[in-house]
Image (cartoon, rainbow, N blue to C red):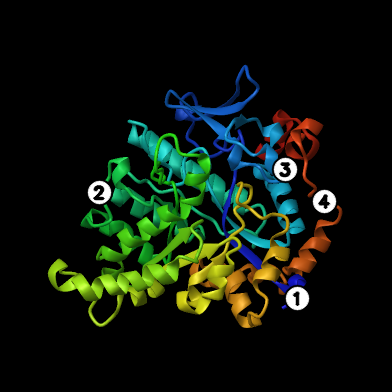
Amino acid sequence: MDMNDMILVSVDDHLCEPPHMFDAHLPKKWADEAPKLIRTDEGNDVWTFNKAVIPNVGLNAVAGRPKEEYGIEPTCFEEMRPGCYDIDERIKDMNAGGVLGSMCFPSFPGFAGRLFAAHPDKEFSADLIRAYNDWHIDEWCGSYPGRFIPMALPMIWSADECAAEVRRVAEKGCHSMTFTENPVPLGEPSFHDEYWNPLWEALVDCDTVLSIHLGSSGQLVVTAPDAPMDVMIQMQPMNISTAAADLLWSTLPRRYPKLKIALSEGGTGWVPYFMDRADKTYDMHHLWTGQDFGDMLPSEVFRRNFLTCFISDPVGVALRHEIGINNICWEMDYPHSDSNWPHAPEELAEVFVGVPDDEINRITHLNAMDWFCYDPFAVLDPADCTVGALRVAAGDHDVSERSLSTGRYESGGGASLIDFAAKAAGR
């Protein structure tokens, strides 16, 4: 397939929430307690909430920066590409990168909304979750129909409230709910506890995907306190494989065979060994551990219930038939440090050499459409959705690397941050 004919839908991107996001959605009685963005004396933009300070960490928003400037230091909005937080600029960046669709995980609330869940007043927490979800669905995704797969935060402190939110947002067209890879560190029952049954039932009823992102429990695989940062970065996919094992060996996918579970930012190359090891474990040990997969193997259950995704994974693509063509999606991870924006099409063209067109289409967009109830072609002409067409639409949008030494970005495509917030609030 010619690179320019590909249609790319990313099932794992991120956004840096803008300062106005709660203005139109949170009940006014919480105005004084709502999360607020402030500028520190050091010039960093941080969120304040529940007596905590949450910075915009550098690695969360390095799109367009040279690699030597990556880091974990706090940043301000003017040090980010405006596409990190401004929906209009995000669309320009997507077009320039040849990307049709995107599903965006949150930043400062945590991937599973654990920051909001930690507040002692659960009425307030619930209103925050609903406000965030309404902003994300109605404003971020709703501003450009067909360009985004909406995603909701969970009310992770209550299975019943979480289930109710699944049903509420499904009525708004949202069929993805982000969730922790392990509820236990958050003080909640494990995946092996039937406490969560109302949530699983709601997900199945609403055809909604349980989208699990690594690090959402607040824990990452770290070998030693003095280990180099590179160890943690390389080991990140192991967090997802741990969650996959926990979920696979729970009775959850067997009790709810139509439940859909997406594993985000974990890659795919490890999956064939994971499935082989699961089948071997079952064969050798199920008679004494009591596991019963009926007439299926664990690997077959995995292929039925789990979706994996990759950024640029030549090993995973080479082993795609072992994984399952219908179980693989593509992700871009914009604007994080693993992202290959704006050159994803070029990298994918190299990875896809020798792959049939129908399999490329499955991986680049059709699987995402099927799993997440996403149909961009209901509102957009497919001819306008290709890499080539989107890049033509981007025109002369600047995607060149920009060092902080050459000056800061201007927020919102040329406006001050205050002007940007006013413009966005009046959308």
- Assess disc 3: are there few (<14), some (14-19) or many (≥20) residues with their C-alpha within 10 Å of its C-alpha: few
The count of marks equals 4
State the quadrant of the N terminus: bottom right
Q: Amino acid at mark 2?
A: Pro
Q: Which residue is mark 2?
A: 189
Residue 168 visible in the current orientation: no
Which residue is the site of mark 4? Answer: 397
Tell me the amino acid under the disc marked 4.
His
Q: Which residue is mark 3?
A: 66
- Determine the residue positioned at 30% across, 78% down: 297
Residue 40's place in the image compared with 398, above or below, is above
The residue indicated by pointer 1 is: 2
Which of labels 4 and 1 is toward the front? 1
Q: Amino acid at mark 1?
A: Asp
For marks 1 and 3, give the CA distance: 28 Å
Mark 1, secondary structure of its residue = loop
**Taking 390 as reference, is 64 above or below it?**
above
Q: Mark 4 or mark 1, which has the lower sequence index?
A: 1
**Eyeballing the image, is 407 above or below 216?**
above
Residue at the extreme right: 396
Kind of element beneath mark 3: loop
Q: Position of residue 414 (x, y in %)?
A: 80, 36
Between label 3 and label 4, give the one nearer the viewer.
Answer: 3
Dividing the picture into quadrants, the one containing residue 79 is top right
Residue closest to the far top: 41
